[in-house]
Image: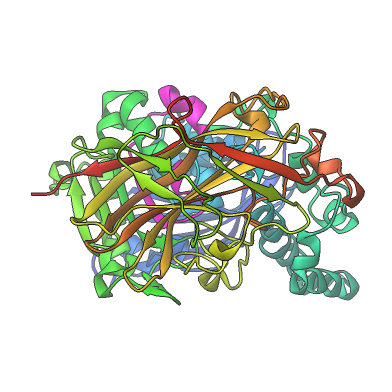
Amino acid sequence: MTATTRLIIERNVRVRMSDGVELAADVFRPDTTERLPVLLERTPYDRGLVPVAGLNWIALAEAGYAIVVQDCRGRFGSGGTFRPFLDEARDGAETIGWAASQPWSNGVVGMIGGSYVGATQWLPAGSAPRALRAIAPYVTSSDYHEGWVYQGGAFQLGFSLRWSLESLALPALLARQAAGESLDAEIAELYEAIDHIALLYRHRPLRGIPLMDRFAPWYDEWLRHPERDAFWTNLSPQERYPATAVPALHIGGWYDIFIDGTIRNYAGMRATGADERARRGQRLLVGPWSHAVNDGLFPERRYGTLSGLGAQDPTTLHRRFFDHELKGIDNGWQHEAPAQVFVMGANEWHAEAAWPPVDAEVRAFYLRGDRPANTASGAGHLSLEPPGHEPGDVFLYDPRDPVPTMGGATLNQVGTAGWNSGPWDQRGVESRQDVLCYTTEPLARSVEVAGSVEAVLFVTSSARDTDFTAKLVDVHPDGRAENIADGIVRARYRESLATPKLLESGRVVELRILVGATAACFRVGHRIRLDVSSSNFPRFDANTNTGGVIADDGPEAIVPALNRVFHDSTHPSRLLLPVVERA
């Protein structure tokens, strides 16, 4: 194929599912009698929106691929009812079979796309369709409970509510209006709700909001399943790695809401994929990006011209991957380092033979201090020396005044994600009395962290249930406190996301908080800081501390909690950093 290849475009092709529902697809293919491999994207966001998956689909078609873009069930041109995640495995597998059987297809299919469109790849891949030979999931998760709707047992309120309204409900209504339905009142109502989303974030109880019942019924269904029960495990890609037989090109961002799932998908498939081809065929690319910002340029931080996804030439990257996996072309792809990651702080790309790097050594930085650690001006320290006899720290967590979300791996504001995600100066929240800050001395040598960061905390609470948050921060010489990664644990799920266990008054428990995956260099003169609190709102719902069903608690049920963090020889609370020594 050449740049002058004529393309055939077929619109609104009907693909009949086994239950009789017809899904709408568009097909873009070179005008040739040659049978070609197929690249399939299944999307809930309107198949008419191009470029496909942010790629130059014309260049991919000219490179010898038939491109198929399909609306998911119940979305835009497709029939049926949209139920997030529930129908994607079957519909995806049947569409893969359809694409493989077309006269212009050679029977080999790859899949592309990001975010939810990553779910439309992983879910059918778990049933190992014969024709599916490779996938390229971008900024997506490994599980739709842990890391999508919930995290550490806490509900991802900001993302779940806004995504449901702005990305799913509103576009569907606008499409119906464009087709002739009279929906002015409903659309105006949705716009009003989105414009005043902060009011919905604070609505109590979480469940039973009339607007959500009418326009996003799945929202209450998610709230009815706070535990990782069969509803979620039946949908989980990470439960099906041993049955999943596809090489995958994983692309993610260190500030993406789904970064931990992206890393789990890569590592899990590399370790337990269905066959040797799948295990050896995993590739990882992670940059200093959030879910909606992939150029490395944030309002408070710029990582350089070469930090953006565009500098990686994603269309060529995908073409080389699929040329190797679908066409069998020996283009050297298989000989390249499987992991390419951007190290923030050092602001450079590293090629790694494994992720995390094999030479990453987990080091414990212990929480210390003989005086209160409340606020960044407190006496909290991080030290490589274990604690002795120290009093620990206490703070009052009031769900009516939660710690506000300040950047991070967020997707609270879909339309303006650039200003509410990524690296932000944390000094505003670090001035609060309900935030404990533990900080190293200025570093005499750089510390490079590469892998998953974890915090181990020994705690008590006056409540039967509460949350604890942990945030890794890079403190610059001028005092700027830049967030690197953060996580949360709802105390009732400290032992299992499936089986809650409430706290007992006065009993010290150990919490392990996944702070998150990262690659970051803390430079000479900088300081490493751990912030500990009990809320990060509205990224996560504020725990009401009652020990009851949080989604059903009204404002009158809210209980403040007195929360303690211990750091002594019996309770060595610590930050675990995977450190890489560079020559």
Query: Which residue does the image show at 24% across and 51% down from the upper left?
Result: 448
Residue at left offset 44%, top offset 31%: 572
In front of the other: 104 or 576: 576
The residue positioned farthest toward the left in the image shown: 583
The magenta segment is 237-261
Residue 242 lies in the magenta stretch: yes
User: Against 39, is 357 above or below?
Assistant: above
Q: Is residue 544 above or below residue 485?
A: above
| Residue 477 placement, left or right of 507 | left
Task: Specify the quadrant of the image occupied by residue 53.
Answer: bottom left
Point out residue 44 in the picture as x, y percentages from the top left corner.
Answer: 62, 55
User: In front here: 330 or 8?
Assistant: 330
* Count of numbered circles in the view: 0
Q: Is residue 264 left or right of residue 88?
A: left
Relative horizontal placement of residue 29, taking residue 156 as reference (left or right): left
Residue drawn at point x = 46 percent, y = 61 percent: 290
Task: Tell me if I can see residue 185 in this picture.
Answer: yes
Residue drawn 30% across and 40% down? Answer: 384
In the foreground, 384 or 319: 384
> Residue 460, percent across and down?
64, 33
Where 466 sits versus 78, above or below? above
The reply to whether residue 76 is in sight is no
> Which quarter of the image is occupied by the N terminus?
bottom left
Q: Position of residue 263 (x, y in %)?
A: 39, 42
Image position of 146 (left or right of 328): right
Q: Is residue 448 magenta?
A: no
Q: Residue 107 at x, y = what percent?
A: 38, 39
Asked whether 475 or 95 is in front, the reply is 475
